[in-house]
Image (cartoon, rainbow, N blue to C red):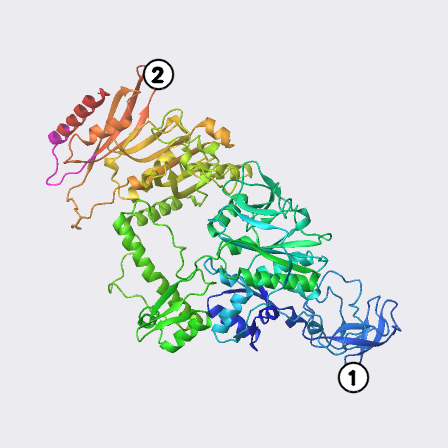
Amino acid sequence: MKFSVSWLKQHLETEATLEQITGALNTIGLEVEGVEDRGAALAPFRIAHVIAAVQHPNADRLRACQVDVGDGVIRSVVCGAPNARTGMKAVLGLPGAVVPANGMVLKVGEIRGVKSEGMMCSARELGLGEDHDGIIDLPDDAPVGEAYARWAGLDDPIVEISVTPNRGDALSIRGIARDLAAAGLGTLKPFAPAPVAAVYPSPLRWVLEDAESCPWVVGRAVRGVTNGPSPKWLQDRLVSIGLRPINALVDVTNFFTYDLGRPLHVFDVAKVKGEELFLRRGREGESFLALNGKEVTVTPEDLVIADAEAVESLAGIMGGEHSGSDAGTKEVFIECALFDPVRIALSGRRHELRSDARARFERGIDPALLPAALEAATAMIIALCGGEASEVSSAGAEPEWQRQASLRFERIAGLGGSDMDQATAIGILERLGFAPVLQDAEKVTVAVPSWRNDIAGSGKLAQAPTLEAGRAARAAEGCALVEPECDLLEEVLRIQGLDRIPAVSLPVASPVPAASLTPKQSRATLARRVLAARGMLDCVSFGFLDSKVAAKFAPLGSAADWTPPAALRLENPIAADLDQMRPTPLASLLQAASRNAARGYPDLGLAELGAAYRDITPDGQLSVVVGLRTGETPRHWAEAARGVDAMDAKGDALAVLAALGVPAAAISITTDAPGYYHPGRSGVLRQGPKTVLAIFGEIHPKLREELGLAGPAVACEVFLDAVAEPKKRKKAVPELPAFQPLQRDFAFLVDAAVPAETLLRAARGAERALITEVALFDRYAGDKLPEGKVSLALQVTLQPREKSLTDAEIEAVGAKIVAAVTKATGAVLRG
């Protein structure tokens, strides 16, 4: 919301400075976002009279001027402008002034032997435009010595504030003035426009077909108008806040939109078909050309203003080109209506139309202001364009907006922490327009003014439909009691000054602060750190992607014809190719890797902790940490670079699980990875038959090709929600065996289709009291072995605890290992 200080003073009688105004706005909750004060930069520049301008004796393109700035001193100024001449009025900057365009500080100097005691400026040098062909040429009646900024009306600072969604009244300059007056910065000027006499019957009448969306509408015509450019004062008002003047009739409506927060619209009566204007819902197939040049096709959910033939306006949002006023308009009809905020907001969003009118209607406007605003607008139109007014045409009635709210005085200190006395609190409420109706020693009850629809109003959030009826009734009753009082408390506290509310620390629950992260959050952070330590770059990407890409990442266990759930499709995506919630963060990382490869970075590691979306339920959003490697390993003097493979991804997954406390002995591997992995070079890490901890492997070659990845790509996905929280155990003294461990190697001949994991698990369970570790250290397949057979060599570590093992005991353990492996896999010990 922008306004100029001079415009503000049309409603506020005050001598406050700009600094006092902006400071007060911040303390009462109308946060200042910016101040544009061109007058401050132009203050040193004055209107000067060029007494004489002659050719410079030593330069062809310079003029030696004698200049008077009204202080009795004639100054010598050298000027290079081609329009510098004797007798003209110009803008002069004296020594010490700073040129706005380039920051140059003016000094007394000498140019080609002639003294120069200032600088006559062009519009560009003063930051007022792009014209730099010559110095500013002022009219003959410009007062010599006057500050140029003051004379040109450039000393009017522009203030921009942010307005919260509940403060529709603050989207008017009068509303801002009211708040500042309540804060003690002046006196609010009265607003009571005199009625304009009606001369003839209204040529148009309202027909209200949707009273729910528009409870009240008034309007009147003005005939005999002469439309044209609006006067300079009105144009300056609009230009100062960033609006473009159009013509007098339209400028009047824009003026009151900001001045009173009361949007208006004018129809050219000659262009309206019939004698009635209908406020009704849109119909299928209806459309109109809006004032912004956009063709709008309305729906039955939109409220429109229509004549006998077609739609003329999208109510409360934007008028139509057809019935707009122009230079030929001779009779105009002013529309002033009250619309349902929700209807306006939904229609504006549906058609992607933004306007100053919509911004005010969807926040709620003063429901009692319609007659006064119509009188004020009628009077201004007649004053600017001439003409005479018709009778007022209306439909509906002023809604029952009257309501009351109460404030207990003890809440000012108990809830607000302020020592404000009762009289001060009541005085603030009165200055804001709240009229006391009942007061005692404990509380005050006030009548809420019509312009404050955010206090004790009906704009509460809807309750959940699943809420139990009794609980819902109690909640609604509690809100009706608590919310209005809190609203009044907020008003008295903010007008007193938000900076005067004492800062109070929250009570300390315990001397020792509780953990800032839950165990789940700690595991997530640890998982990210593990992958970062393994050389991967931590990424943050969108949680949505192209639905066509999402279809390529069917989750584990999905049917062959899996498609992304329609419930996870975005209705209003930020881009056409970001319309689906992603089934896995791996899809986002693969696209990122593809973009990097296309720009010359094929070898990289990326990681992300993000969400995978499977359905719309809370359980359907999984927390997944993903690691992706592409290209080749880094070059090193000790070993040649190689393409990344599935074992790299497996190592990443196991490292994360180990850091999260999952014992390696509890993990089993299956080969049923999802279809976006290579079917023969991937696996699933499980804890038990049902719990899937992670997936790893090489990305399917076809998918790599579709995504534009030429080299190898491997990935792992660790499902953090599946990792159980480690059990809390009492720490015991670590066991340090007194006996040295010993190792034995076993080579088994086994069918090539048997997973090595089966051998490892069988050997590990052969003698749990002594076997502490089993590792695969060799795999051989060649012509010296029978067809379809491979040799797998295991290293078994035995750890004696009570005594040294004898040869016989070692042989007995070895026999158990061979027997267990043979039973589990059919393998035989190689000789």
x and y, in percent, of residue 572 in the image = 49, 41
**Residue 726 drawn at (x, y percent):** 23, 45
Tell me: 243 left or right of 728.
right
Residue at 59% x, 50% y is 205
Depicted 636 relative to depicted 344: above or below: above
Indicate the position of residue 675 as horizontal and vertical percent values.
39, 27
User: Observer-nearest residue: 481 or 573?
Assistant: 481
Mark 2 Cα shell of 10 Å, populated few (<14), some (14-19), many (≥20): few
Residue 801: in magenta span: yes
Quadrant position of the C terminus in the picture = top left
The verdict on residue 487 being magenta is no
Residue annotated with mark 2: 783
> What residue range appears in magenta?
797-811
* Foreground of the two, 442 or 274: 274
Comes first in the chain, label 1 or label 2: 1
The answer for how far apart the CA atoms under marks 1 and 2 are is 112 Å
Tell me the kind of residue under disc 1. Answer: Val
Which residue is located at x 34 percent, y 73 percent? Answer: 439
Residue 586: image quadrant is top left
| Res. 458 mark | none
Image: 166 above or below 70: above
Question: Helix, strand or loop at disc 2?
Answer: loop
Q: Is residue 261 visible?
A: no
Give neighbour class at mark 1: few <14, some 14-19, many 20+ (Cα, 10 Å): few
1 or 2: mark nearer the eye? 1
Label 1 secondary element? loop
Q: Is 380 situated left or right of 769 in this image?
A: right
Q: Which residue is mark 1?
A: 73
Q: Quadrant of the N terminus?
A: bottom right
Closest to the observer: 203 or 65?
203
Tags 1 and 2 touching, CB below 8 Å: no
Please name whichever residue, 491 or 403, is drawn nearer the observer in this view of the structure. 403
